[in-house]
Each structure stands twice: as C-alpha cells, then as structure tokens.
Image (cartoon, helix red, strand yellow):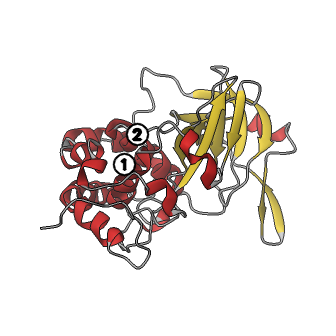
Amino acid sequence: MSRYDKGRETPLLQAVQHVKRMRGGAQAHLMRCSDGGLYVVKFQNNPQHLRVLANDLLATRLAERVGLDVPKTEIVQVDEWLIKHTSELRLELPGKTIPVCAGMQFGSRYVCPPHEGLVYDYLPETMLDRVKNLNQFAGMLALDKWTCNANGRQAAFWKKGRERKFTATFIDQGYCFNAGEWSFPDSPLRGVYGRNEVYAGVTGWKSFHPWLENIQNFDEDSIRELAESIPPEWCGDWDDLARLVDCLIQRRSRVEELIWSFATSSRKPFVNWSEKVN
C-alpha cells in the first residue's frame, strides 16, 4: 500500500476561523475553512483516539461510494497561529485543559449552515414521515455492519428554508472498525440506530438494495485507494491499515449474515418484514 502523498495536487483546506465547540466525545469544533464552508473538525489529540480521524475519513468515503447521504469529508490544516490566538480551541481532559494540536485534522462538512435552515440530532416518531430519505437507514445499517461500527448509529436531520421534508445525513463514523482497536468484534446490536421506527420500511432483502449490492461488489482497488488517502500520522503503524483493508475486503460477503443477526435479535427491529425466509 502506497503512502499518503503530501505533495498531492489538491491542496488541503485551511481552517481560518473558530465558530463553536461541538458536543460529543471527540470534542470536535465547528470551524470555517478556506473554501468558505463550515466543517466539524476532529483533532489528532482528541480524547477518544487518534485513529478515529482515519476511521471517519475512510468509513464516510466508503459510505459515499455505496450511495448513502453522508457529509463531504476533507483533511483540514489547522495552524499553530490560529490555535494560539483562539482561546476556545481547547480540549477538556480529566483534571486539565489542553490546546488542540496543530497539523492535519479531520473535517466533516456541516450539513446545513445555521443561517440557511434547521438541524436536529433527533426527531420524534411523529415527524419521521417528514424525512425524505428514511429508507437509507437500512443502507447505513449495512455499511455499519460491514465496518463493525462499535457505536450507536448517529444521524443529523436537516432542512433548508421553507422545505417541508427533512434529510437524514449519517454522521460520526469514528467508531467504525472498533475505534482505535481496528478489529471486528461483531455483535447484533452494535452499529444500529437507537429506535426501531427508522426501520419500519424494511420489508425484506429488497429494502437493502442497492446498498448491499454495492458493498458486496465494491472494487478492491477502490477500497485500497480510499485508504491511501489517509495521512499516515493518523494511523500509527501503516501495516495495521493494510490489514484493516484486507479484512474489509473479506467482509464484503458477510454483510447479509451480520444484518440477519440483528434482524433475529431480541430487539426485533424489522416489524414489517414480509419476505419469506428460506
């Protein structure tokens, strides 16, 4: 596997302004970048693990190729000068507060700028019929099972201006590949959304197409190419990343089995499953 090319043609985005601190265990910060966009930025010295940056970049780009609604991802350069002159760019650790580190960080494009619309991390059941891509929760389940997301599935629900319908965007893939462990301890209830209502439209295996088919047929070279875009300083041992990619390639054929283990779990998530099981 070739290493990340620091001299690549596409320049890194530059963080130019701090906007606010975000919620969550990684203690990300919302920042305006040199393209004018807002990005949720996770830092290399975040409290979770260095590798959550690599996980978020790789898993989000895999999801995008599979055809799921995920944020645009970028590698964001945060300079020492900005950190030194921005008192809010700090991380809260047990017993101390430290500045974020400079260098290349992970950036996820904010789903909807505050002045353009509304963003919620939760919608009540009575409003789920106003989510125009609710069927994608099935596709994201397939992706989370493939990548062994060790966390619950998270989504942001947003709409612009006078739009009546919300869009669900699947965020925070940092705990895919079992966070910093880069292992695959599969469990039926890992990597799933917290409420069965989002799976109400699942009536059989046809509800998982085309996402399941796209995963099973995901080109090996394309997977390796996406992994090669990860900065090596996010990975630790580059050989570990190569092994991770090999596991991902092998697991493409197991996704259906992993979905079924969730389907038959005590949670009984697919209440409208009508397809006959052979």
- Relative placement, left or right, of 170 versus 183 is right
Identified at 43% across, 56% down, the residue is 199
Identified at 31% across, 63% down, the residue is 259
Which residue is labeled 2 in the image?
68
Identified at 49% across, 54% down, the residue is 198
The relative height of residue 10 versus residue 129 in the rendered view (above or below) is above
Give 86 or 61, whichever is nearer the viewer. 61
Any part of residue 18 in sight: yes
Hey, what amino acid is under mark 2?
Answer: Leu
Hey, what amino acid is under mark 1?
Answer: Gly
Give 180 or 129, whichever is nearer the viewer. 129
- The quarter of the rendered structure image containing the C terminus is bottom left
Q: Quadrant of residue 97?
A: bottom right
Which SS class for mark 2? loop
**Residue 91 appears at what percent x and percent y?**
76, 56
**Residue 94 appears at what percent x and percent y?**
78, 71
